[in-house]
Amino acid sequence: MKEGDPDDEEELGAMALYVFVFRLMTAGELVAVLNGEASLIETCAVDRKLVGLIAD
């Protein structure tokens, strides 16, 4: 999950793992997300649930 120098020993912090529920997008929302004008999560996520933590 980490790119760069394989000898770099910088530790990554814990990361949360979520499951999201999305609603269907309108054509306008889809175009905005694909063009980078809108965030998929902010546009269509209706629920999220923490399912775990990933740590080194």
Image (cartoon, rainbow, N blue to C red):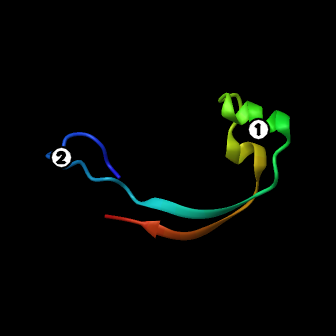
Residue 54: x and y in percent read: 42, 65
The answer to whether residue 47 is left or right of residue 12 is right
Q: Is residue 21 above or below residue 27?
A: below
Is 50 in front, or is 40? 40
> Which residue is found at the position 47% from the left and 67% from the top?
53
> Which residue is found at the position 37% from the left and 55% from the top?
13
The answer to whether residue 3 is left or right of residue 35 is left
Residue 32: x and y in percent read: 75, 31
Residue 10: x and y in percent read: 23, 48
Residue underneath mark 1: 30
Residue underneath mark 2: 6
Taking the view exactly as shown, the residue that stands out farthest to the bottom is 51
Number of other residues with Cα within 10 Å of mark 1, as a class: few under 14, some 14 to 19, many 20 or more: some
Name the residue type under label 2.
Pro
User: In what element is the residue under mark 1?
Assistant: helix
Residue 33: x and y in percent read: 70, 35
